[in-house]
């Protein structure tokens, strides 16, 4: 059973530069654990404290898994999982010209 | 509090070469979305370092102090770039009340190591500040902007 996992540039250090790797599992969580056995360190970039990291987007085929079942999302042979770091940022809390 | 960051030396090793047209499109987008932060990408052929295709993105945060690409839109855009053999050469966003310099948040979320991070400030209604940076492993280096 093979599931293709597309890897973003910033995580290719864990895959020897490969843009895509294959894995097995019946849930996303299992799939990531499987990938970890061949690409140590990758799982920690995706999961923090048992949940998907907030600023990493994981898609099952065309859907953001946040709108499916997160790490429990079921995956199967022939599925494609895509990982993209969220693009985000901003000035943050505006500095105020006040006593604080 | 004086920000030591604003005095950073501009490095002479990398430069953002960008056309006047693309420069204007970025600034116009920032002005249009003000007071919310605007954000987007300029795609170019992989390895070329040439920004060519302007892709304004929706700011899913719709905030004057944060931005985030909508995750579904990001997938579509990244897939399209992949099909066209492109990569994000420029990732831009605006600051609406502060300087055009990467914040701690900007630095911690920068995840495209080869991109030029462009910051525009729309805090002044008459003059837009436009600066470009490389952000690698948490380190910010400002670079020259060359209008071509």
Image (cartoon, grey):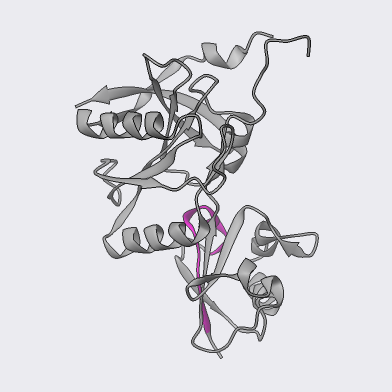
Corner quadrant of residue A74:
bottom right
Residue B85: image location, x then y, percent: 28, 59
Question: Can the viewer see residue B136 in this picture?
Answer: yes
Identified at 38% across, 19% down, the residue is B128
Residue B146: image location, x then y, percent: 27, 23
Q: Is residue B30 above or below residue B82?
A: above
Q: Is residue B54 left or right of residue A94?
A: left
**Relative depth, front residue between A35 and B45:** B45
Question: Can the viewer see residue B110 in this picture?
Answer: no
**Relative depth, front residue between A52 and A17:** A52
Q: Is residue B97 left or right of residue A31?
A: left
B2 drawn magenta: no
Corner quadrant of residue B115:
top left
Quarter of the picture containing the N terminus of chain B is: top right
Residue A35: image location, x then y, percent: 63, 73
How many numbered tags mark residues here?
A: 0
Identified at 27% across, 41% down, the residue is B51
A10 drawn magenta: yes
Identified at 78% across, 14% down, the residue is A100
Q: Is residue A43 above or below residue B22?
A: below
Q: Is residue B88 above or below residue B8?
A: below
Residue B127: image location, x then y, percent: 37, 14
Identified at 51% across, 34% down, the residue is B36
Quarter of the picture containing the C terminus of chain B is: top left
Q: Which residues are magenta?
A: A3-15
């Amino acid at each position: 059973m093979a599931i293709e996992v597309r890897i973003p540039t910033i995580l290719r250090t864990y895959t020897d530069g490969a843009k895509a790797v294959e894995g097995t599992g019946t849930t996303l969580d299992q799939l990531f654990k499987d990938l970890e056995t061949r690409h140590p360190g990758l799982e920690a970039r995706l999961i923090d404290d048992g949940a998907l990291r907030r600023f990493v987007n994981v898609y099952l085929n065309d859907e953001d898994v946040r709108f499916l079942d997160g790490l429990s999302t079921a995956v199967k042979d022939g599925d494609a999982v895509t990982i993209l770091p969220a693009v985000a940022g901003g000035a943050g809390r505006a500095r105020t010209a006040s006593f604080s | 509090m004086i920000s030591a960051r604003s005095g950073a030396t501009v490095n002479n090793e990398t430069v953002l070469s960008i056309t006047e047209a693309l420069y204007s499109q970025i600034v116009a987008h920032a002005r249009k979305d003000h007071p919310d932060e605007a954000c987007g990408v300029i795609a170019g052929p992989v390895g070329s370092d040439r920004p060519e295709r302007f892709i304004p993105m929706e700011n899913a945060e719709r905030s004057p102090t944060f931005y985030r690409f909508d995750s579904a839109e990001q997938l579509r855009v990244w897939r399209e770039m992949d099909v066209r053999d492109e990569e994000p050469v420029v990732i831009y966003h605006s600051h609406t009340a502060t300087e055009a310099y990467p914040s701690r948040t900007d630095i911690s979320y920068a995840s495209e190591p080869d991109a030029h991070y462009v910051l525009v400030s729309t805090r002044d209604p008459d003059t837009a500040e436009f600066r470009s940076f490389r952000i690698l492993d948490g380190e910010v280096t400002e670079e020259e902007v060359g209008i071509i």
